[in-house]
Image: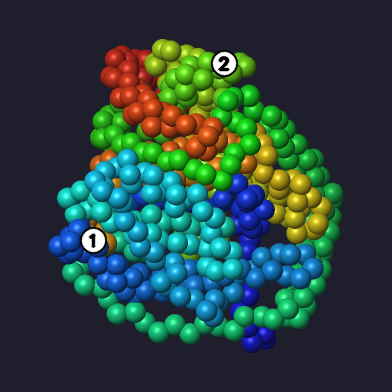
Amino acid sequence: MPHYIAERLPAEDASYLLFESPNAHMHLAWVWVFEGGSLARPDGGVDIEAIRRHVAARLFRFPRFRQRLAWTPIEGRPAWVDDEGFKLRYHVQHAAVPEPGDEARLRIMVSSIVSQPLDRSKPLWELWVVEGLPEGRFAVVTKIHHCMMDGRSTVSLMKGLLDAVPHAAPEEAGDWIPRPAPGPEALLRDGLVDRAKVALQAAQASARWLGGGAWREVVEIGGEVVRTALAPPPATPFNRPIGPHRMVSWVQAPLVELERAALRAGCGVQELALTAVSGAVMRLLARMRARVAGDEIRVVVPVVTVPGDGRPAAAGNRTAAAVVSLPVAQGDVRRRLRAVTRAMADARREGRLQNLDFLLQVAALGGRLGLGAGLAARRRLYGCNLVVGEIPGPKSAVHLLDARLVAAYPLVPLLDDQGLGVAFSSYDGGYHAGIAADWEIVPDLETFAQDLRAELIAVCDAAATIPRPVARRVRADS
């Protein structure tokens, strides 16, 4: 038995390290806005030391947060090892919004925070406490590399750090003793053994496929996936090489109104959100005086699946996805909603929700075998114009100590040639949209955010006018 600990990353987790580039930073982010509670100081600041003690006491729930990456010498495959030099103060940072501390200045601050890549020599997460908001409020900006967590796992982080019942004081942190990390010789030896195992597994799988005829199905499914994903999406002004600087914004809408509208329209809230995104993109294209070939864009809609191998919910990725087309030249909201509903129904019915998982594993496997980190190359991997995520959050209020969370906005990372990304999250009766963009590609992001809010209202109003028989037919079609 080795006297050290080195846990290799699963293929899907490792793929997000391959996707990263100097301009495309693969960290997921959240903007949590809190009431001050007892954490608010009389001078308008926040008790950062109490928050650090609270985070320290909860880190036992997230072992990955005290681990860093190590790399095997030959194939360069990543593994998790305990960070013997872990310092919480480096990861829990403190900042202040300039006066008057309004949302516009908070957005500028968050934009700066998410524009910086995570340091790969340390555990791949940061938590920024931002004070100076009106009425004693403060924000927490979390950054977590996608190789550690997917969208739903970040909600597990929220539930692990925040509580339904408010607490006045932090708990006591337990002792933590880092486990020994392997040296270069041990990583080299384990890399050789692992490489042999990969080759043996590939040979055994090939024999099973060839003997049982399953290879035909694998080739057929793989070919369809690759054709779909690698086919260039329609050209748009926001699909071009991005820079490292981000601009962010956010909006929210009442969840109950969206749920009523979805029930009336015979679809889900996700379909309403996608319809609103298509409308906001239509307005953006009109301002840019651009038209898309076919009057449709392709979006990847991540769908997080339930872990089936016993891994903790708070670690790793279990992502499937649908690549669907959204109409961006249809001014009639009801027709747009119907088109989006059918597109999502078709994607689910045809099993296309597994395409992203397949591609990520192939990309990571190719990188391990040295056959093409080119397949893991970022450009056009999803074959889509933008990512539109949806993450279900807590249904009732949660607290950081006794500070109540009032809003939670998710932010997705941008790929190398995707200058715009949108993510939605439900929390405590609200539906929150976080928007990230390259600040040069979409300089009027605030206008896009207001358009998205207007489109959410418009799609709710349109659903209210759908007669009941029509709603039943839409549901039957799906």
On the image, the x and y values in percent for residue 28 come to 48, 51
Identify the residue at horizontal 26%, vertical 30% (top origin). 257
Residue 45 is marked as 1
N-terminal of the pair, mark 2 or mark 1, is 1
Q: Amino acid under label 2?
A: Arg
Q: Tell which of 237 and 270 is nearer to you.
A: 237
* Residues tagged 2 and 1 counted as in contact (Cβ below 8 A): no
Residue 305, relative to residue 435: is it above or below?
below
On the image, the x and y values in percent for residue 274 come to 44, 29
Residue 101 visible in rendering = yes
The N terminus: image quadrant: bottom right
Where, by quadrant of the figure, is residue 296 drawn?
A: top right
Identify the residue at horizontal 66%, vertical 80% (top origin). 182
Identify the residue at horizontal 59%, vertical 39% (top origin). 242
Identify the residue at horizontal 84%, vertical 55% (top origin). 207
Instruction: Please tell me whether mark 2 or mark 1 is closer to you in this view.
Output: 1
Q: Secondary structure at mark 2?
A: loop
Residue 328, relative to residue 453: is it above or below?
above
Q: Tell which of 184 and 458 is nearer to you.
A: 184
Residue 322 visible in rendering = no
Residue 291 is marked as 2
